[in-house]
Structure formats: structure tokens, C-alpha cells
Amino acid sequence: MPDSILIAEDNPAARVGLQQLIRSWGFDVDVAGDGEEALQKVVLRPPTIVLSDMVMPRMSGIDLLKSVKQHDPSIVVVILTAQGSIETAIEAIKDGAYDYLMKPVDPQRLRIVIDQILDRGRTQREVESLKRRLRDQGQMGPMIGQSPEMQQVYRVIEQAGPTNASVLITGESGTGKELVAQAIHQASPRKNAPFVAVNCAAIPDTLMESELFGHEKGAFTGALARRQGCFELADRGTLFLDEVAEMTPATQAKLLRALQERRFRIVGGTDEKSVDIRVIAATNLNTKKAIDEGKLREDLFYRLNVIGIQLPPLRDRTDDIPLLVDAFIREFASANHKSVGGADAAAMDRLMRHRWPGNVRELRNVIERGVIIARGPLLTPADLPGLADVAVAATPVSPGEVAAGMTVDELERKLIDVTLAHTGGNKTKAAGMLGISVKTLHNKLKAAGLEAADAENAG
């Protein structure tokens, strides 16, 4: 029996046109002239997919969506909306809609969405396999952890993966935000399409728009040939924007428009292009503070944060450290042809006591170095020269250094000084401890007139 699709549309011409189009693709299609009629048909003969207009008499598309999901959560609902109702359509996604399509409906885009939905059955079976692996091994893809905090992250990934919803991942540097984005991509119908990652903090502001949207030959000095941007490269797949709050407000505005309209214009071009992408973004900043300070546009935040995932720092899930250590030892012993099989009790105690300001990334680097220099079958404290015997505590600030009447800028500068002193001038580690990007740290030092005097030490 072919998959069935129910069209709920009060405009007769639009209803018949969609019915004929979808039927020509080989699907069983039924129609309804309003939300109440559609709901009656859902109860009598549940379809695979409901395509529902947003504004209809007797029952709106939103009310139909809620009723359908209450009757049978497995039925997939796609909202059809006019230009002025995009905000309502985004709310519909939060209420359980798979996606929304702008009217008049683009046939190519509609076919893509239908095909993605029909792939969900296979994808959901793979998700179940991931769940079993999680229960057995405490692992989801490249992510490792059995702690309650990571179990919650896995659950959200399982829920978000099969949908088209935008995801915003927050957490300190080194917690594995890109790994989460990759896991969402692998749990989605887009898994066989490209996963394109962009580190927004590493791209100069003047080149960001070109990086995202591409450029025509001669669009600016140095543009010697046409170049595809990440939007085009990620077509039918997933675009991951790491450190999205590092974009300038002007670029954020252009990104927001492209996400809302699903169209963009390359730099130096005249025609708009349409692509089918899912966007996952990440930031290590406190989003509320970033919005208040003007670093992150509030409207872009709401567009990206349809589903939010907060990654815990490693110090808040220390029970996962033995699992991570074991996995990293196996990885680097194999890669370096070493016979290291684990860590002895003293080394593991030292690893458990460390506060890990660089989170999982720092732990991975420590284990890689330890495996390379190890002389025996187990890692020992001697193989972990960068770790102290006791927990690493933040360098204290004496009460005399903080006084009433000091400005916030003065306190911030003092905090940066203390942290840089603690890391021996290592800006990468200092940025991780402060919960900001290296680019942001450089900007703060530059604003204080100290950037030129500081020698970069990323070791």
C-alpha cells in the first residue's frame, strides 16, 4: 500500500493543484476543505503525512496539528504558510510540526520534504540501535558518557535528529559541541548528505559573508574565481555554525534572512539561490548575556534555538572520566603502535582530581601525550607531567584587589590578568577557563591596549 498524504487546504484551486501534483508522484492522496474535515479523515483513516494550510475556517492549521499529534504522534504534519505567518510557522515546529513550506509551494522543495519524511522510518530504526548501544556501552557515536547529564544530552539528540528543526548547542570550549552536531546529523534523514562545519571565530569579519554564501569572480579584491559558500556546499545536508555569536550583527542579520526565507544571494551576484539545509549552531557564551550586550541578535537566537542543548563541563560529570580515558588510550595506543592498555590507580586518581578547564578536549590531549611518552603497559603519574597531585584551583584574588567603586571593566581586566597568570600566558587555556573564545579574549586585550604587547602562546 503506498504512503498516504492528506491535504488540508480551503482554497479549491490550491487544493486540487497539490492533489494532482502529489498523485503524479505515485502517492495515495486525500483532501479536506478545512481543519475539522481533515481531523475526521485522520481519525477514520490515518495518513502518513498531513499537509495543512495555516489559516482555515472552523479549525486552524495549528489547532489541527495539536489534535493530530494528540490522536497519533506518529503522523507527520507539514504546515503551509504565507509570508506574513513565518513566526507562527516556527511556533508550529515547536508544537510538533516537521517543517513549514512557504506558499505558493515550490514543487521541488515539497518533494524533498516528503522524501525526507518517508526516510524517517529507517532513521528511527537506526536511532533505536543507537539507544541500545547507549545502554550497553554509554556511547552515542563519538560521544562517551553514562552520567545523567550525558544521558539527557543523548535523549535530546534522539528527539531532534529525525526532525528538520534548528538546534542551538551551548557549553564551554572543549565540551564537544561539534560532536553533538555530528550526532544529530547522523540521526537525521540527511546523514548521507554533506555535514559542513564553519568556525565563525576563525574567519575574518570581512570574509564571513563570502564564506557563508560564496562570491562571484571579481566581487572584491582577490576574488579571482567564483566560489561556492557553505550554504551551497551543505545543500540537502547540515550546516554547523560554531561560535555563531562571533559574527558581526550585520552578518547575523543576513544569516537570519537566509534562514527565514531559505534563499540567499552570493556576494557580487544578482540572482537569489535556494538550498535545502538544516542549521545547527553553537556558542560558548551565555546567550542571555550575549543578547543583552548586543553580541547575539535576539531574533537570530530564537530562530536557531528551536531545540536547545546545554553541554555540561567535564568537572560536572567526573564519573565519565574513566570511560573517556579508556577510550582515548585505546585510540592513541592503536594510532601510535603502543602497548599501553590503561592507567594505574595513581594516574587515574590524578586525572579524576584535575578540574579540566579545557574539558574533554584537554583530557584527550593529555592522554595522547601520555600514551606517546609512556614506557610501560599502564599510564602512570610520570606520564601526566601537566597535572598536579591535587585538584587545580583557580588562582585566588585577594579581597584587597577588589574594592567598591571599581568598574565592571576594571574587574574584568583583573580577572583576565589573573587567569593569564595562572596559565602562564597561554591564551587558549585562559579563554577556556573564562568561558570565552580565543578571538573574544584577543579583542578584550586589544581594547585594553595590551594585545600588541602580548606574545601569542598557544602551546
Image (tube, helix red, strand yellow):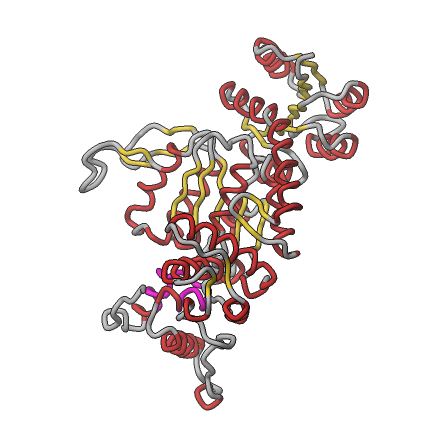
Q: Could you tell me which quadrant the C terminus lies in? A: bottom left
Answer whether residue 104 is visible to the viewer in this image: no
Q: 11 or 100, which is in the foreground?
A: 100
Q: Could you tell me which quadrant the N terminus lies in? A: top right
| Residue drawn at the location 50% of the way across and 33% of the way down | 191
Which residue is outermost to the bottom? 400
Name the dominant secondary structure of the magenta segment. helix
306 horizontally vs 340: left or right:
right
Based on the displayed image, in which of its 4 quarters is residue 59 positioned?
top right
Give coordinates of residue 289: x percent, y percent: 51, 63
Give coordinates of residue 381: x percent, y percent: 45, 70
Q: Number of labelled discs?
A: 0
Answer whether residue 333 is visible to the viewer in this image: yes
Q: 405 or 383, which is in the foreground?
A: 383
Task: Please determine whether, in this image, residue 329 is positioned above or below residue 417.
Answer: above
Task: Please determine whether, in this image, residue 252 is positioned above or below residue 275.
Answer: below
| Residue drawn at the location 64% of the way across and 18% of the way down | 11
12 horizontally vs 58: left or right:
left
Q: 31 or 397, which is in the foreground?
A: 397
Give coordinates of residue 398: x percent, y percent: 47, 87
Residue 1 counted in the magenta span: no
| Residue drawn at the location 59% of the way across and 32% of the way down | 99
Residue 436 counted in the magenta span: yes
174 horizontally vs 226: left or right:
right
Give the magenta part as a residue range.
430-444
Task: Please determine whether, in this image, residue 81 is positioned above or below residue 449.
Answer: above
Q: 390 or 43, which is in the foreground?
A: 390
Based on the displayed image, in which of its 4 quarters is residue 437 positioned?
bottom left
Give coordinates of residue 305: x percent, y percent: 56, 47
